[in-house]
Amino acid sequence: MKIRSVETGEAIVRQVWLANPALEGMALDDDGIAWTAFGPTARRHEVVMGSLGLTPASGSSNGDDGSTATALEFVTGILAYLEFDLGAAHTRAA
């Protein structure tokens, strides 16, 4: 949270997420913010903190369906929130 731009001196960290071995799924620290398919309902300049409960299934290296769904929901939402163009990324990688 205390990382600043060397050019402008502004704080550059806007989101902090903790992935932990728990079954709760996604939880935002601020009840005034919701998670959607497009990421958090906060504006881009706001600080968003939360946690991801990810627990692999017992005896499995692939993870359980709940953890996989939570991870996919988080990654898809955060990429949409950051307006990341997956199509352009795939084109550059090819």
Image (tube, rainbow, N blue to C red):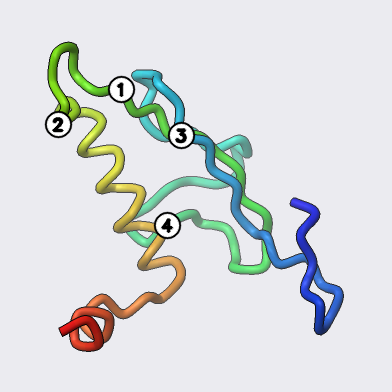
Quote the CA–CA distance across marks 1 and 4. Answer: 22 Å
Say few, some or many: other residues with alpha carbon within 10 Å of mark 1 (under 14 / 14 to 19 / 20 or more): some
**Residue at (18% x, 12% y) in the render:** 58
Residue position for label 1: 55
Given this view, does label 3 or label 4 mark the residue nearer the observer? Answer: 3
Whether residues under marks 2 and 1 lie with C-beta atoms below 8 angstroms apart, the answer is no
Pointer 3 or 1: first along the chain: 3
Three-letter code for the amino acid on which mark 2 is drawn = Asn
Given this view, does label 4 or label 2 mark the residue nearer the observer? Answer: 2
Secondary structure under badge 1? loop
Q: Which mark is residue 62?
A: 2
**Residue at (19% x, 28% y) in the render:** 63
Pointer 3 or 2: first along the chain: 3
Q: Which mark is residue 19?
A: 3
Q: Is residue 8 above or below residue 42?
A: below
| 44 with respect to 82 (left or right) | right
Secondary structure under badge 2? loop
Q: Which mark is residue 39?
A: 4
